Image (spheres, rainbow, N blue to C red):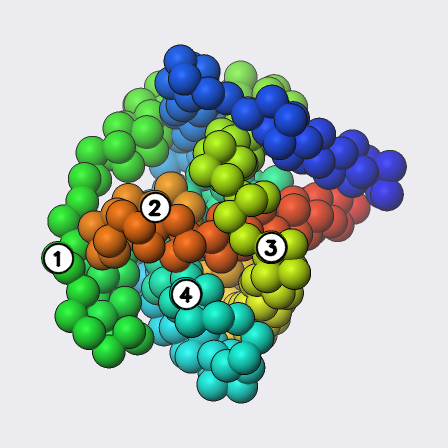
Amino acid sequence: MLRRLDSFLLCLLGTVGLATVLPCRGAGVSVFNILAIGMIANMFFLQGARLSRRAVAEGITNWRIHLAILLCTFFMFPLLGMMLHALLPGMLDSAMWMGVLFLCCLPSTVQSSIAFTSIARGNVAAAICSATLSNILGIFLAPLLVGILFSRHAAGGGGNILPIVGQLLLPFIAGQIAQPWIGGWAQRHKKLLSFSDRGSILVVVYTAFSEAVTQGLWHRLPPAQIGRVALVDMAILAIALGLTHLLARLSGFGYRDRIAILFCGSKKSLASGVPIASVLFAPTDIGLIVMPLMVYHQIQLFVCATLARRFGERAED
């Protein structure tokens, strides 16, 4: 188990190292963004092709799991951020605490949450619906929560849901349409689906970390401050994972639903967070505000990759 787990974590570490030493710049940014979009679309197409119509219907109508994930994302996290701020006000400076509270207001990730749910053999159909719903609602809820937590009126939440529809829902629907013809092939070639899941995660890690590096991640803050941000982020993730797992168990969800709640309810979206920050904050503040989010994004990918592999191997056994 350790050898198989290390192979994927080594790929993640290698990807971060590559982004640190050789981040994508200029035209390379567009190339990797297009590559990420293509791999994500392909992943959802294969997911749609593999899932039966019955499984999709159950995922869409499973309102209990959607409610649980939304409560974790938009209720549990803000309370957790305020609690840590009250308990440890001197741990970070005011700008970093604003970034932490902003992080707690954001929607869940989409592609990595669903990919990890798939790797862990969880309820992928419900994860697709819940994660996408979280991102759509986050366009409006995140600015509202920021205004409440910061005790001021946040700017309007406008946003564009077309990328979500284009990258996620349309390929999934196309896979469902093609399911009668290629569903059996997709079931027989699960390794291809696994490669799509992991490949999309690695591309997202590289593009996200490249952006952080080119924005001066290692120079903007002293190492001690970044270390304290990482400790706070790790505490938030650890508590969130524990609470989502406990909530799912106490609510009587089955194994596959608990996996979806765990990975969708404990994640925060860097892809949604940066555009939302550009609407809510002055340009001079955005860099520091999103710093805790960028650190949290990397930590959640490493931790959830480990958990997903362990849950997936346990399910296979």
Q: How crowded is mark 2: few (under 14 residues within 10 Å), some or many (20 or more)?
A: some
Apparent side of residue 221 relative to residue 33 in the rendered image (left or right): right
Of discs 3 and 1, which sits in the foreground?
3
Q: Nearer the viewer, residue 136 or 205?
A: 205
Q: Residues within 10 Å of mark 4 (few under 14, many from 20)?
A: some
User: Relative to residue 9, is residue 134 depicted above or below?
Assistant: below
Percent across and percent down for residue 71 are 37, 70
Residue at image coords 62%, 65%: 228
SS for callout 2: helix
Nearer the observer: mark 3 or 4; the answer is 3
User: Residue flagged by tag 3: what amino acid is it?
Assistant: Pro
Sequence-wise, the earlier of marks 3 and 1 is: 1
Pointers 2 and 3 in contact (C-beta within 8 Å): no
Give the percent coordinates (x, y) of residue 237. Answer: 57, 63
User: Between marks 3 and 1, how big is the CA–CA gap?
Assistant: 33 Å
Cα–Cα gap, marks 1 and 2: 15 Å
In percent of width and height, residue 294 lies at 49, 48
Q: Mark 1 points at which residue?
A: 156
What kind of residue is marked 2?
Val
Q: Name the residue under label 3.
A: 222
Name the element at disc 1: loop
Q: Is mark 3 on a helix, strand or loop?
A: loop
Question: Which badge, 1 or 2, comes first in the chain's sequence?
Answer: 1
Q: Distance between the residues labelled 3 and 4?
A: 14 Å
State whether residue 150 is above or below residue 301: below
Place of residue 210 in the rendered image (x, y in percent of width and height, measured from the top left) = 52, 31
Q: State yes or no: discs 3 and 4 in contact (Cβ < 8 Å).
A: no
Residue that mark 2 sits on: 274
* Sequence-first disc among 2 and 4: 4
